[in-house]
Structures are given as C-alpha cells and as structure tokens.
C-alpha cells in the first residue's frame, strides 16, 4: 500500500518515492562565494521561510524485481532527522523488505540511519552498495587524523555503518549498472566517492544526484556557491555546473537528498542561468 502523502513518480517499471527523514541544522554562514545577506534575499524571493535547517530525503525505489533505498538519512545523529523508518512504515515498507541500499556518500545525514544506537544494522536483509573511494576515504586513519576533532564523529559513524554491513558490502569502482535499470555516475567534489544513480525504464529517466545542492534556490542559479560540507569546493562547483547543464539539456527529472520536501524537480536554463521548478 502506498501512502499518497509522499511525493512519488513512475519511471517506466520503477516507482520512486521521496521519504522524508526530517531536517538537519544549518546556516547560510556555511556558504562560500556569496554574501549571507544576498543568500538570504534569494531564499526569501523563492518563498523559503526557514533559513536554519535543511530537509533530508531518502528515496525508496520499487521495481525491476527489487526494493531498494537510496541513502538512509541521519538516524538522529546530532538530533538530525531520524524519521526514516517511521515514514517507511507509513509507506507500507518494513526495514526487512529493503534488499539494497545505494549510497550516494557517507556523510552523517546519509548513513546515520543505517545503524541503531548500538551499531546494529537497521536493514537486516539489505546489501550496502557504495563507491570504493567513499569507503576508502572514511576508513583511512590519515584522513581521520587530519580532521578537526569536532568532526571525528562523522568518521566514526561512517565506519560503524560500513562495519555493520561488512558481510554484504558491495563496492563499485566505476560508473555502470548496480541494479537492473539503475546505473551509477561519479559526481566527485562534495566527497571523493560522491555518486549519483540514474534510473532508466520504458523510455523514461530520473537522476538521483545526491548532495549536488543543499540550498537549491541559491545553488541552482549560482552553481559557484559552495557549502562547507563540500570537501573540494572547486571540484564540487564544477560538478554542479556540469550536472545543471546535463539535467537542463536532457530535460531530466531530478531527485536530490536536499531538494526539499517536494523531492522531485526539473532544471531549466533561462538565458545565462539555471532555474529549478518542482514538478
Ligand atoms: Zn553530504
Ligand atoms: Zn547531505
């Protein structure tokens, strides 16, 4: 049974549903290359009331013979999110029914929901699918030691997630099909192994682009604006520009973990800039 309260799209044989995990705390001060007052004005003219939080989506994909989840939300880490399993139940899905979790990257608001407070896997029958560079980055002790202590929790959470699924961890090292009809694409910059997933079925397509934007109404028209979460801000904005070009020229339906509660959008090129419309 599908709860119609969750935004949902049909892409050929796939049904993809945006499942809210809740919100994470943020601030416009995290943005670079833009004056916070300008950023604030852009949000206001887009009708955004709240400038201090970012919505987190996970995506449930049914079809092609599989029930999969793309990312798992924050799981309550730093009191962020944590509503995924409750909302999955409202959509008629129990954790044991999830057969695969496709990971865009291992930031806390994407892997926190993979484990419970004791480090047990929340999804007992799911394989965890991730880019090798992402797994390697978070497991590297050198990277951990170069990171300020206040951010060590992110490493520990990512390691706990990979460890809890170690017997069913599927690591890929290039773009290509990860499940029938679902291909992965490398979108580096936000993190080293940041990856998107493209669904193609029945002549229709949808791209789940992960964390390409955190404030869509700012970063779509201004892809040069990065957020402190982008590990390589230059590469992240290059990747963002490339994807805005791809999404607008192909008319691709986009899904993204921080697109907001509506979950799905189109990108349009307007003159020399890009705009986002929620389909
Ligand atoms: Zn991220
Ligand atoms: Zn994120």
Image (cartoon, helix red, strand yellow):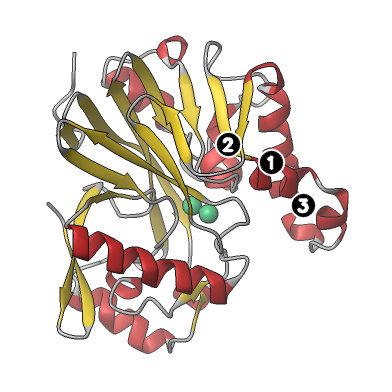
Q: Is residue 39 left or right of residue 225?
A: left
Residue at the image position 66 percent from the left and 22 percent from the top: 165
Q: Is residue 119 in sight in this rendering? A: no
Q: Residue 49 location, x and y as percent?
A: 25, 66
Residue at the image position 19 percent from the left and 23 percent from the top: 13
Which element type, helix, strand or loop, lies under badge 3?
Answer: helix
Which element type, helix, strand or loop, lies under badge 2?
Answer: strand
Residue at image mark 1: 135
Which element type, helix, strand or loop, lies under badge 1?
Answer: helix
Q: 203 or 98, which is in the foreground?
A: 203
Where, by quadrant of the figure, is residue 241 drawn? Answer: bottom left
Residue at image mark 2: 130
Q: Is residue 178 in sight in this rendering? A: yes
As displayed, is residue 8 above or below residue 168? below
Q: 23 or 275, which is in the foreground?
A: 275
Q: CB at mark 1 closer than 8 A to ligand 1? A: no
Q: CA distance from mark 3 to mark 1?
A: 16 Å
Q: Residues within 10 Å of mark 2 (few under 14, many from 20)?
A: many
């Amino acid at each position: 049974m599908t709860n119609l309260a969750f935004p949902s799209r049909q892409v050929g044989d796939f049904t993809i549903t945006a499942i809210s995990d809740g919100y994470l705390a943020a601030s416009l001060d995290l943005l670079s290359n833009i004056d916070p007052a300008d950023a604030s004005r852009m949000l206001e003219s887009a009708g955004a009331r709240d400038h201090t939080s970012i919505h987190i989506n996970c995506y449930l994909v049914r079809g092609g013979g599989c029930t999969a989840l793309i990312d798992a939300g924050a799981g309550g880490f730093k009191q962020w999110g944590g509503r995924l399993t409750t909302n999955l139940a409202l959509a008629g899905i129990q954790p044991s029914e999830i057969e695969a979790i496709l990971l865009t990257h291992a930031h806390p608001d994407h892997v926190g929901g993979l484990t419970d407070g004791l480090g047990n896997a929340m999804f007992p029958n799911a394989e965890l699918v991730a880019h090798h560079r992402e797994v390697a980055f978070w497991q590297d002790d050198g990277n951990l030691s170069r990171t300020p202590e206040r951010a060590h929790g992110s490493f520990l959470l990512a390691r706990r997630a990979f460890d809890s699924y170690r017997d069913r961890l599927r690591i890929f090292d290039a773009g290509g099909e990860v499940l029938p009809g679902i291909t992965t694409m490398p979108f580096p910059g936000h993190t080293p192994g940041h990856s998107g997933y493209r669904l193609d079925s029945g002549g229709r397509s949808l791209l789940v682009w992960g964390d390409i934007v955190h404030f869509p109404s700012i970063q779509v028209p201004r892809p040069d604006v990065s957020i402190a979460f982008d590990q390589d801000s230059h590469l992240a904005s290059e990747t963002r520009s490339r994807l805005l070009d791809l999404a607008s020229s192909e008319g691709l339906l986009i899904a993204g973990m921080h697109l907001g509660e509506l979950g799905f959008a189109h990108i349009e090129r307007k003159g020399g800039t890009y705009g986002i419309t929620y389909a």
